[in-house]
Every structure is written in C-alpha cells, then in structure tokens.
Image (cartoon, grey):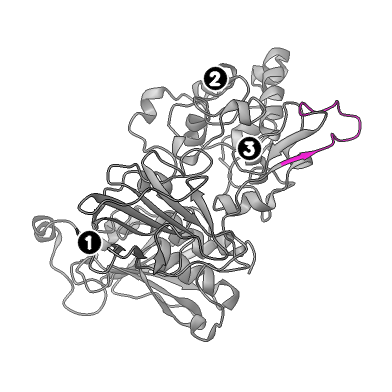
Amino acid sequence: MKRELLRSPHAMLVAALLVSAFGGLGACQSSEDDAASGTPEASGSPGRCVYTSAFSQAEECREYTGRGWTAATAEADCKALQGSTFTGGERCAYPETLGRCVLGGGTDDAYAVVFPGGDASQCAATQRGCEMFGGGQFEPDACEAATEDPGIGTGGAVFQWPELVCVEPEAGEPAGQSDGKVCTFGAISGCTEPGRRFTDYASCEPVFTQRPYWPAPPSDYKTPSDDPRLSDPEWLAELAWVTEQTEACGCVCCHSENTAPAGPSNWYIEAGPIWTDSFNPSGLALAAGWVSSAALGAYPPDQNNGFSRDTAGLPTTDPARMIAFFEGELERRGFTREDFADMTPFGGPIYEQSLYEPSDCAAGEGVDAAGKVTWAGGGARYVYVMSADAENPGAPPNLDLPEGTIWRLDVPSSAEPMKSGIAYGEVPASTKQGYPADGPPEELVPGTKYYLYVLADVGIPITRCLFEISP
C-alpha cells in the first residue's frame, strides 16, 4: 500500500469529518430538547441519511443507532450534511459494503457511517481512519477477509520528513543562491527560489504523505466575461506574480492539474480565465490572512528561500502584496473581514489537537520508577515526555518540538513502529532521538508531574496524559 492510505476517499471522510465522535449535529440534544421534538423510536431505526462527502465527493450513509435519536433529531442532523437525503424508518442498504464505523457505541448518541463498495484495497485505510482518526469501532463486511494490516507500518503512507535537496539549476536558468545550486525543502510548506517551479526542484511524493489529499471540486464562481480586470495590464501582472509565487511552493502539488494524482484539491492554477476563481470564499480568507492557518506549520523565511507564511496564508516573499491581492478577490465577491470573524482557524484535527487539555494517565500508562514508558493505542512513531505545562506537539517544521520537551524518540518512516514498554532515555535500534540533539535527556524527578504524548504518526495521537513517578 502506497499513498492510498492517506488518499482513500473513505479514510479522508473518517479522518476529516469524524475526528470527533459526534461531528456536526451528531450528538443528541438535552432531554428538554428530546421532549420538544418527540420520543425516541421504540423499535427499529429512526432513519438513514445518504449524503455526499464534502471531501471525497463519494456517497456515504449514516445510520442513527442510538436510542436517544428520534426521526426529528436524525433528520435535523442529516440536513447539515452535503447533498443529503433523509429516509425515516430505514437503514443503509447497499449490494456491497466495506463495513461500518460505529461511533459512540452503546450510548444514546451512537451512530454509524456505512461505506459502500467491495474494493478490498481500501479496507486498511478505512479501518485506520475509523479507529485511529475517528475513535470509532470498525465492523467489517467485505473487509472481513482482507489480509492487509490496518496499522501504520513499513511501506504505508507514513509521514515523510522533509529533506533539503540541493541540485543544479535547470538548463537556461540562472545559478542558484547556494554556491550555484538551488536548495529546496521537499515539504508542503517548502518553497524553491523565487521565479522557479517547485516541481523542477523537489518531488511531490513526500508532500502527499505530509497532508491528507483528496480531489475536491473547485468553487463554481466565474468571473464575468466583461470584468475590467481581464483587460487591466496592471492587475493581470499581479495575477501573474501570485501565480509565480504559488508555483514555487509545495502547495502546488495538490493544486495543479499537472501534479495532483486524481485531480486538483479545490483551487488550481490552471483554472481560467482567472484561476483564483476556483477558491472557495474560506480559501480566499485563508490566503488573505483573515483566518489563521498557523496550525498547518511553516518555515521561517531564512530557511525557505525568502518565503514566509506568517501573515498571508500562502507562502510568499512579499506578504503585504499577497494579502492585498486576495483582499481584492474577496472584495469583488462582496465579502468583508467580518464575514469570517467567527470562523474556526484552519487545520482541522491538527488545530483541534492544539487545544487538547490532558488529564491524568490511566493505570499502567506513563513512566514508572524503573524508567519504563508505557502507553495505550498500539505502535508509535513519536514518543514525547514533556513538562506538564508544555504545549501539544503540532505540525512540522515549526510546531513539532514545543518548549518544555524533555525527550522525544522518533521512528523513521522506513522502520516499524515501536511498541509500548521502551526505556526512558534509551534509543532502541531503528529509532533515533529527536530531542535532545546530543546526550541523554534530563532525569525525571519523582513527585513531579510530566506530560506523556504518543503519536502513531504525525497528527495521529494515541496517548496524551499526565503522570508522575512515585517517590
């Protein structure tokens, strides 16, 4: 299994839409609301919701299985989903299904997402998306006979850490800025030198592992044929500059017809007559810096060929100029900054993880007096021991080593994940110490509270809790 682990439509649905157990209106309302909207169904199902995933554009079906659902509350939940149709008193029915992801099983709020189809190659991604991202329980159907490991192991779409690659310039291009060579980080937030194309100097293959990709439809907004901008040389020159800046950076991997594996993800640079028409309004707000996307991570300009992303949402060597352009795009569509004042910052699960507040570890988790590190949730690629008040680890390259990190142990993408039970401060074979850079970590003090943060892969936490070593 290659990139498909992150690019499976079903995995993307679960990862993006079901990262919390009850997305949208998924949780039933209070008992007072239940009384106002009817009583729970005495038997059978209150209904099913067939809808189109906003990310994969594939059909999915939601069953309302908890006893707290009524036909009225289920239908209200369904209306919040894209292209949805609610049918009362029925369950999801398909000739073949991969299986179903049960969320909140055994509670009044429980529901299940049913995945139609019989392609067993999607089973591992679907199960992983359900259980690791969604926190649900996967019940296989066509996937029952699948033999592929649903975990993250060698050969899967493990996060590929960016590497700085320095190469000779393309024929006919000027010498590079690094002893004549052109140096580029192979990252979604990486950029090559201004005036050059990212795809000429870096591969998109690792980029696809660094951020979930799916082919999403572009905005249906179209510039009128008589728009004066189409004949304004000054404005067209600004558009050409924005295009050049975008083509220099890793985001082009998912936003170009020439590089996106199964079609561009929403906006793309070949769209016409003005390619920025393909942005949704929220995307324009990101590009203009009206809605924060800091959770997605960024390089400082001095490491990224002068490109920054601290104010503008797209990497640029001139943030004020980039912001001015996209503010103009928002203005011509009739939007103001106030329209996005209440919008959640970009980053989805990564942003939500930054807000997580840990509680005490369950019995058997943490670091014991003998230095044994244990956690729940399966194999891990990153194990952090941090001060109790440290920020949660976030996206590379600038948010993955928060202040207060005491020790981090990493597993390279070419190796199998590590199992619970490692020794604090030791570096087993096939692992490397991510922090400190040299020497052993500081000793842990009995009676002091620390933060254990364990990830199955970047952006996939499996244990996050506070512990202390008994004196």
> Quick one: label 3, few (<14), some, or many (20+) residues within 10 Å?
many
Whether pointer 2 and pointer 1 mark residues with C-beta atoms closer than 8 Å, the reply is no
Q: Residues within 10 Å of mark 1 (few under 14, many from 20)?
A: some
- Name the residue located 43 percent from the left edge and 32 percent from the top edge: 292
Residue 119 visible to the viewer: no
Kindly identify the amino acid type of the residue bearing the numbered disc 3.
Gly
Q: Amino acid at mark 2?
A: Gly
Residue 190 position (above or below residue 366): above
Label 2 sits on a secondary structure element that is: helix
Which mark is in front, 2 or 3? Answer: 3
Look at mark 1 in the image and give the residue it sits on: 72
At a point 54% along the width and 19% down the height, the residue shown is: 328
Q: Considering the image in quadrants, where does the N terminus appear?
A: bottom right
Question: Percent x, y for residue 212?
Answer: 54, 53
| The magenta stretch spans residue 65 | no
- The residues tagged by marks 2 and 3 sit, at their Cα atoms, a distance apart of 26 Å
Going by the image, does 354 lie left or right of 30? Answer: right
Q: Residue at x 57, y 40 (%)?
A: 220
Residue 310 higher or lower than 107, as above or below: above
Q: In terms of depth relative to the viewer, which is nearer, 400 or 210?
A: 400
Percent of width and height locating residue 376: 34, 68
Q: Which residue is mark 2?
A: 328
In this picture, which residue range is highlighted in magenta?
165-178
Q: Earlier in the sequence, mark 2 or mark 1?
A: 1
Between tags 1 and 3, which lies in front?
Answer: 3
**Residue type for callout 1:** Ala
Kindly identify which residue carries mark 3: 190
Q: Quarter of the image holding residue 267?
A: top right
Q: Position of residue 400 (x, y in %)?
A: 47, 44
Among the two numbered marks 2 and 3 on one chain, the one whose residue lies closer to the N terminus: 3
- Check disc 3 and report its element: helix, strand or loop: loop
